[in-house]
Amino acid sequence: MLQALRPARTGISYWARNVVYADRSIIVLNKPAGLICQGSVEASSENKPRDVDKFNDLLRGAYFLLMFDVHDAMHLSRWADVKDTFALENLPYPVHRLDKATTGTLLLARNSPAARQFSQQFQSRVVGKTYLALVRGGEKSFPTRSGEIRDALEFSDGRVSIGESCAAKFAATDWELIASSPVAPLSLLRLTLHTGLKHQLRIHLAHSLHTPILGDNLYARSSISEKIAKITRLPEKRIFLHAAQLTLSRYRKTGPQKHFRLTIGAPIPKDFLTICRDAGIPLDHIYVDGGLSVDGQHVADVPDLEGRWLRKPPVLRP
């Protein structure tokens, strides 16, 4: 096995099994719903928010049981952490964050220099961010097959809204209609996130496009259609927004073309797949399976980075 992927323990924890890709600089997780992915590599402080400590503890493996309401202490020793699994000297460094309800690609840096490098890519908007969203609305809900949303956002008392004041922040989202259900007012959208403001996609889809994300009760202005409830089972406290792909700038050590674009895709969660199946919405295998591509070409691994794909796609029961 490649040195970058050599585990320090013989067993792989649940948390480490969420890793989809690793190379000598980064580790990419398929984040589950419900995880608060805010953390800090600094020493503990009494003034630090409790959620920061929880995420750091989760990277160590200690708080996995608490966060997901798993109470069987007999299995506590099985939650080996990412740090030990990948033989890191320190905790992995969170480079960006996803909202608690969002699933999908979450990037961790293996060391401080890598954290600085990829943080700069996010700040300078070099990173490509592609999301999939199941939204409430059929094909007739959309004026075209694709479009741009550039409505600025305002923030007040923890709430986000479309705003036009001087305090509003620029927000940019591109959307594309992939498919709509033939039996219920549901559609699948592919989203490109150019800016990364809090709840940006949820607000833009609900209040600009008027097609709220399925399960988003905070920003939806109407109740869910009975047609949707009749064809599928909707989990509680679940918002169907998935960070499907991250595209990063990477570099080879040798050769005439040192720069390349690496895309890492996280498989869609099973409940997302189930609703698409029940609604008759087709899904491309790229999003079902996840995987890697270099400059748009599918690859099994990335030898220049000692990188390898580590996950199998989810299997749906009939």
Image (tube, rainbow, N blue to C red):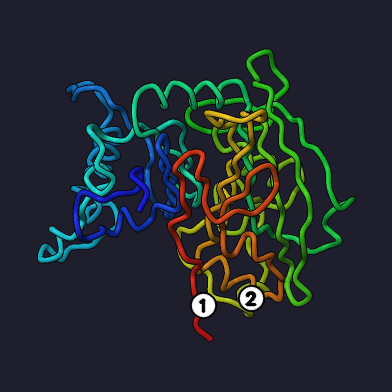
- Residue 216 in the image: x percent, y percent? 57, 53
Q: Residue furthest top?
A: 166
Viewer-proximal residue among 38 and 20 = 20
Residue topped by disc 2: 277
**Image position of 62 with respect to 153: above or below:** below
Q: Name the quadrant of the N terminus.
A: bottom left
Tell me, yes or no, whether the two marked residues, 2 and 1, touch with CB atoms within 8 Å.
yes
Residue type at mark 2: give it. Answer: Arg
The residue carrying pointer 1 sits among few (fewer than 14), some (14 to 19) or many (20 or more) residues within 10 Å by Cα, namely: few
- Residue 8 in the image: x percent, y percent? 21, 49
Real-space Cα separation, disc 2 to disc 1, in angstroms: 10 Å
The residue carrying pointer 2 sits among few (fewer than 14), some (14 to 19) or many (20 or more) residues within 10 Å by Cα, namely: some
297 relative to 176 in the view: left or right:
left
Q: Secondary structure at mark 2?
A: helix
**Image position of 108 with respect to 285: above or below:** above
Question: What residue is drawn where x is 62% and y is 44%?
Answer: 202
Q: Earlier in the sequence, mark 2 or mark 1?
A: 2
Residue type at mark 1: give it. Answer: Leu
Question: What residue is drawn where x is 26% and y is 34%?
Answer: 91
